[in-house]
Amino acid sequence: MAAICDDEVKTEWPELAGKLGDTAKETIEKENPDLREVVILLVGTVIDMAYMTDRVRVWVDESNTVVLVPKVG
């Protein structure tokens, strides 16, 4: 089950694992329009470790398949 904050905003999308990255991005933006950034990244990309409550990283493999559960952070 997806995580929900106190105000009932979705913060996690386990159902998107295995889907295409572009589809996941669109779904996340639709289900949580308050996000500042939803970004698709190839697994292994170097990132900062900052936790941001208005960002979701969608981790995909070389075939653009989501390989990790997208979540706020």
Image (cartoon, rainbow, N blue to C red):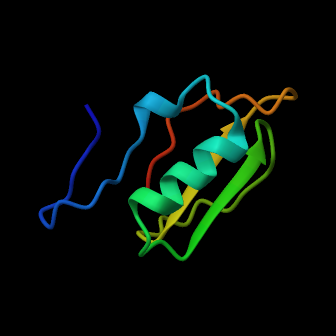
In the rendering, at what x and y percent does residue 11 appear? Answer: 35, 53
Instruction: Give the camera-side residue of 47 and 57.
Output: 57
- Residue at (72% x, 57% y) in the render: 47
Q: Say if 55 sits above or below 13 in the image.
A: below
Q: Say if 3 sits above or below 49 in the image.
A: above
- Residue at (81% x, 46% y) in the render: 45
In the rendering, at what x and y percent does residue 19 appear? Answer: 62, 28
- Residue at (47% x, 71% y) in the render: 35
Q: Quadrant of residue 13?
A: top left
The answer to whether residue 73 is seen in the rendering is no
In this image, 25 relative to 7: left or right?
A: right
Q: Quadrant of residue 56?
A: bottom right
In the rendering, at what x and y percent does residue 59 appear? Answer: 67, 40
In this image, 37 relative to 43: left or right?
A: left
The answer to whether residue 51 is seen in the rendering is yes
Q: Quadrant of residue 31?
A: bottom left
List the single residue furthest toward the top: 18
